[in-house]
């Protein structure tokens, strides 16, 4: 899974029917060790994430294992909101 | 999913039978946060996208979950036309 | 899917039994918009492609959806020979 | 599979139910030949790995084949703790 | 599939049970056209490859289609030993 920061929302009126009702958010990947900011992408939010929160994102076919979206063409899902990352080597 | 801009069309007469009837478009990936232009690839259009439009693209096996193409060797599908992206941190 | 140019052939005598009879070709990825040459890889040819031709390649699990190879450990397949790419923004 | 070094832990209270009870660790990818440090990500630990250990990580849908997590939205799993890597060309 | 050179071995005593008996080798990816050396990773050997040999590697879920490992969390498998690569444009 990757760590990311929720940075925005996406709206699409014309879309695949099975995407209806899913919340689409823009997530910027963050390197969990170096905190370097990386590429941004769109993920479906399943846990009620908000702008600015640090989240855990599952990608690929595993994203469809998340609750209630196995029949949607989705390849990235926010599966958790990160409370804390402990990285001893960076202290 | 990734954000992209539709920049062209592709035609292939000799192809896998199961690709018949699918519209193939060239999409250039755009970073949803920084707007940086990235690599281009080919995606099947399922939502009636046109040149110049900003679209949402699903890749990998999840692309085959999109309507009517589960039996085609397709790894990227345009699943939505983006109306608006709201990125508070960039305002 | 990605656009590539067929640049060579690969021969392997010792290989997985299920790869027997498949034609293996070296393909160099080309950016469909900028024409930049990218990394090269090996793909199974399912459409009779020849050296120098521009082709459409499907990767990942979707490659196994192509005809007759679902039981082979294959992650890249040439699924079409490109006749024309029309990219208005580059004219 | 990739080689990585366990560099930290991640805690997420609000998360997909099916992630409950899984140990999430931050892993920094290491190039197995050059020892170059690469990007970091989050993996589920299935073998009792600790901070500082060098581990083997399986990614993508294959991660779900690891024991007991096939029904969880997981795309990276620590599947082994590496005792030794022998690379003759680097001696 | 990708082309690689076998550069080493990996040993892991503590590991997923289903990895037992599989030979793990370190493979350095080689660009099939330019011969450029790229990143290294770990692959299961299914064809009796040795250090220094040039091999064909299948990655992702397709790796699990290789013989006898469909129930193991494996995402890269050596599926062939390359005898010859013919790249006319490089002659």
Image (cartoon, coloured by chain):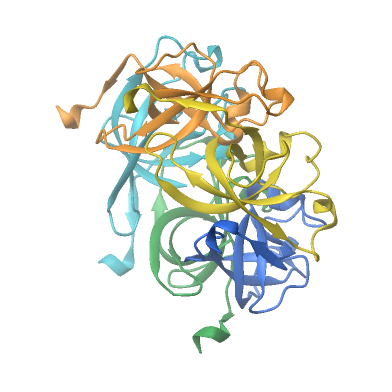
Chain colours: A orange, B yellow, C blue, D cyan, E green
Left/right of residue B12 with respect to residue C14 in the rendered view: right
Left/right of residue D27 with respect to residue D60 in the rendered view: left
User: Which residue, as the protein is rendered here, is positioned at the far bottom?
Assistant: E91
User: Does residue D83 appear anywhere in the picture?
Assistant: yes
Left/right of residue D6 with respect to residue B76 in the rendered view: left
Residue C32: percent from the left, percent from the top?
A: 56, 60
In the rendered image, the quadrant that contains the C terminus of chain B is: top left
Above or below, comparing residue C53 to residue E42 in the picture = below
Above or below, comparing residue C1 to residue E33 in the picture = above
User: Number of numbered discs present?
Assistant: 0
User: Which residue, as the protein is rendered here, is positioned at the far left?
Assistant: A91
Residue C38: percent from the left, percent from the top?
A: 48, 64
Query: Residue drawn at (80%, 66%), measured in percent from left and top?
Result: B14
Nearer-the-camera pick, E39 or E63: E39
Residue C27: percent from the left, percent from the top?
A: 59, 69
Residue B24: percent from the left, percent from the top?
A: 71, 51
The quadrant in which residue E8 appears is bottom left
User: Does residue C74 appear anywhere in the picture?
Assistant: no
Above or below, comparing residue D4 to residue A4 in the picture = below
Nearer-the-camera pick, A91 or C34: C34
In the rendered image, the quadrant that contains the N terminus of chain B is: top right
Query: Residue drawn at (50%, 46%), measured in percent from left and top?
Result: B29
């Amino acid at each position: 899974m990757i760590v990311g920061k929720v940075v925005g929302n996406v709206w699409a009126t014309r879309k695949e029917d099975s995407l209806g009702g899913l919340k689409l958010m823009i997530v910027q990947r963050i390197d969990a060790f170096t905190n370097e900011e990386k590429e941004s992408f769109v993920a479906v939010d399943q846990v009620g994430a908000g702008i600015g929160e640090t989240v855990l994102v599952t990608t690929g076919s595993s994203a469809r294992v998340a609750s209630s979206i196995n029949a949607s063409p989705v390849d990235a899902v926010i599966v958790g909101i990160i409370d804390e990352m402990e990285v001893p080597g960076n202290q």
